[in-house]
Structures are given as structure tokens and as C-alpha cells.
Amino acid sequence: MSVVVPAYGSQEKLDLTLAALAAQTYPSTLTEVVVVDDNSTPPLRLPELRPEHTRLVVAAPDSWGSAHAVNTGFAHADGQVVLRLDADMVAYRDHVEAQMRWHHAADYLAVLGHKRFVDWEAGRFTPEQVHEKVRCGEAQALFAVEDSRPHWIENVIADTHGLTAHHPGIFRVFIGATGSVHRDFFKTVGGLDTDLRLGSDTEFAYRLAQAGAVFVPERTSSAWHLGMPQMLQKWDEGRHQRVPYIAQRVPLHGMRRTAPPRAWRVPLLDVVIDVGDATASDVDSCVAPILAGPDGDARITLVTGQGPAPQDRASILAGDGAQLRLIEEQYDAEGRVRLAAEAPAPDPAVPYRLVLPGPVPLRPDSVGKLLSAMERADAGLLLAELPDAPPARLERTAAFARARHITGGDGLDQVVAGIWGAARYPGLAAAESIGTVFEPPPPSAARRFLRRYFDARQRARLRALLRR
């Protein structure tokens, strides 16, 4: 286990973090700590009371921020599993052990450590006092729990029965402070996006989910977060500074459902259509409803099976490649449509992929109905029947990524049906489950959800809308 501690200033808090890590139950011979100084002024130093194998690395000055510091720490880490722990955390004595235990079960887990926030006064504890309390198993006595605050992610964990009830937005809980993944899995996902100064952990968690990660809340141990986080102190300002950047890269973000139609950096859906010898009119009957409809957050690839249409005099006068030339011209200025000789590999950042065997005439709401059917069935694969053609395939990227990780790439449809579920959509009309069946929550759970997130007036408005 490598513990990566990104740090900027606050030497006193870092000293307490390292004092707590020096008292962990996980064997010191199997643990290293990499402290990454994000170019603090004055520079950070390693205190005398620290874990046996602790190194201090200074981040390169070409970038800055937590994402850059965390990536630097992972690059220097030697452990098979890496735990990111912020430099203002006092971990209970079994905090590292409790997370590491999960990683023996599977190498695609993202384990989330527990924490509570406390107000912090400089000079309240010495490193020796913290070390002794943690070593004796009395870390919980350092602060009064009634004076602390839980993180908002605890509500999500409770509402999803410990993250066991799937929801596409579950990844939001894996943010900052304390969490661990296999180092190779981190590399597969690509690390944190250093272009994001704020919100990089949310975007990274989204890509973990897309790669097939299973998010696990570890609550048998905990940690104290020294001081209230920025997002609790400046919620509105912090949200306004993060949301546009995250929404560009995370199609499942709520802003996508309320923003006016536009092209996004990462689309919600990849549509791959085998156009073959189809006419330009046939292609447009399939593409135009998607682009103009309410579910136009899509990128469309028209697979031609050949290179660009010939443009020489003989070919044009003879009519060779006429339909392909029309298709190329038709979408030349449409940024959401591209032509390719072969179907592209699945994009790991895009949540859904719809593969059509040919240009199928669609309605403006056809794509939305397919996506809704997949979510109702909580399926990893949705097969939509088509007349006189193989079925259309709607694939959930996360499900197929996890299946590839488990099997190496063989029999993916069967594996997805087993680990996530499959469903059939006969005649583009209604979903018929052949795998995991969607089970609505009991009324009591729904009432608890409404009471938690909506006041009495909002609940009345929701009931009125439902009656309509």
C-alpha cells in the first residue's frame, strides 16, 4: 500500500496526519507514504514523527493543484494499491487496513474511506498526542462527535443501501480526502485531469465508473478532517466555479438536463450507423431526428466501409459514389456527425453507445425511449428489434468495460448479462427484461427520499405534476 498525501502549506496539519499514519495497524513493512509538496511557501518538511517509509516529493512547477499533486504521487508510488489521503486528515488506527482489506477481493474497486469534519484550532494537539491516541485505538476521543459534521455523501450512501443499489450518479461519492484504488486501474483510467483546478476528483470518479469500477464505502473505520472543506464554507461560489467545467466532461451531470441544446466536449451517446450503400435520404431519416430531437446530446459516426467518395471528373460524370458524396456534403458542417471507413472503438468517456445495422427511420423521441428503457431495466445491454435486420444494440460503457476487465474480452454479451443485466426492446415500443429486472423502491423508501430532499410545498407540487 502506498499512501499519497498531496499537500499545500499547513505544516501543522501535515504533521498530525503523518503522526496518525505512523500508528496504523497495517504493517509498516508493507506501507510507504509519499508526501507531495505542491510548491508550498515556505517548503514543507517531513517531521520526526512519521511512518518508517516516508518520502517527500516536490511537484514540478509546470502545473499546480490537487490533480497535479495526486498524479505526481501516483507516479512515485511503488505500492500495488494507492490510498489518496489529504494532508488535513487524522486517520483512525485501522483506516489503512480497513481499505486494503477490500482490494484483496478484486482489482477494480474504488474504496471510499469514512470521515467527519471538525472545526480546527491551531495548536490544539501535538503530533505526539495524536500518535498516542491513534496507537491506543482512541482516535475517536480526539473530538466530540456531536461537534462534528458528516459529509453529504453519507446521504447518497444511505439512499442506495451502501452503494449496492445502482444509480448512474453513484460515482459522485468518490471525491477527495480518503479513497484507494489499484495503481494499475488508476493508470488505465488515465489519472486526474490537470486542466481542472477545481472538481478534478469528481471528473476522475466519473471515468473510474466508466471503466467499470465498483464503489465501496468502508465505514468500519473513520478519520477526522481538520477544518471544514471549501465546499461547505463557500457552497454557491464553489459550485458556480466547478459546474461548467465538470458538465463539459461528465455527460451524466445534472446541468446537461437543464442547459439549452449544444455540443459538449464529451457527448452522452455515441451512435454508430452502418450506412453501406444507403442513400443520402435514408441516412438523413435516421440522423436528422437525433440531431433535432430532445436527445441530441450525441455524436454520430456514419460507417461507410470505404474511403472518401471519388471527386475526379470521370467518377462524377458517371455517377460513381454519388450518394456518398451527398452524405459527405450533407454533414460537412455538422460537428456532431463524422464519417469513417470502419466503426470506431468504444470511447471510454461516453456513457452509452448505440449501434445500428443500417439507417433506421427514427422519431425525435426514439433515442430517449431507448435510454429510458435501459435505465428502467438497469441493463448493461439493450437489444432493440428491427424489421428484417439484426437488432440495434444500446450498450452501457461501464458494463462492457467491467466485463472486459474481468474476462479479457471474450463472450462480452453473456458476461454483461450476468454481471449487470440485459433487456429486450421489441419493436422500439416497450422494454421486456431478459436479465436484471428493475425493482421500484418500496413506498416507504420513496417517502423518506422526498422528505429528505424536498420541503412540504415542493412535495405538493410534485404530487400535482404526477396527477397531470
Image (spheres, rainbow, N blue to C red):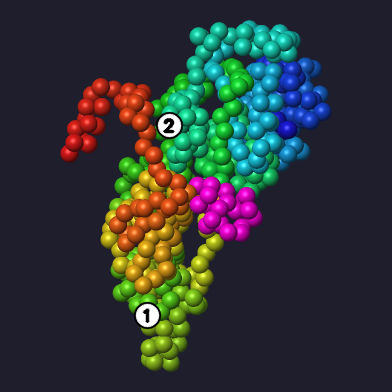
Residue 266 in view in this figure: no
Are there few (<14), some (14-19), or many (20+) residues within 10 Å of tag 2? few
Percent x, y of residue 260: 31, 47
Percent x, y of residue 449: 36, 27
Q: Is residue 329 magenta?
A: no
Q: Is residue 415 magenta?
A: yes
Q: Residue at x 50, y 19 (%)?
A: 150
Q: Amino acid at mark 2?
A: Arg
Q: Which residues are magenta?
A: 402-420
- Quarter containing the C terminus: top left
Q: Residue at x 30, y 67 (%)?
A: 361
Percent x, y of residue 134: 70, 13
Up/down of 360 relative to 242, above or below: below
* Residue at disc 2, secondary structure: helix
Q: Residue at x 82, y 28 (%)?
A: 29
Residue underneath mark 2 = 239
Q: Main secondary structure of the magenta part?
A: helix
Q: CA distance from mark 1 to mark 2?
A: 48 Å
Relative horizontal placement of residue 299, taking residue 418 as reference (left or right): left
Frontmost of labels 1 and 2 is 1
Q: Amino acid at mark 1?
A: Gln
Residue 435 in view in this figure: yes
> Outermost residue, front direction?
434
Residue underneath mark 1 = 323
Relative horizontal placement of residue 93, taking residue 461 as reference (left or right): right
Up/down of 212 relative to 305, above or below: above
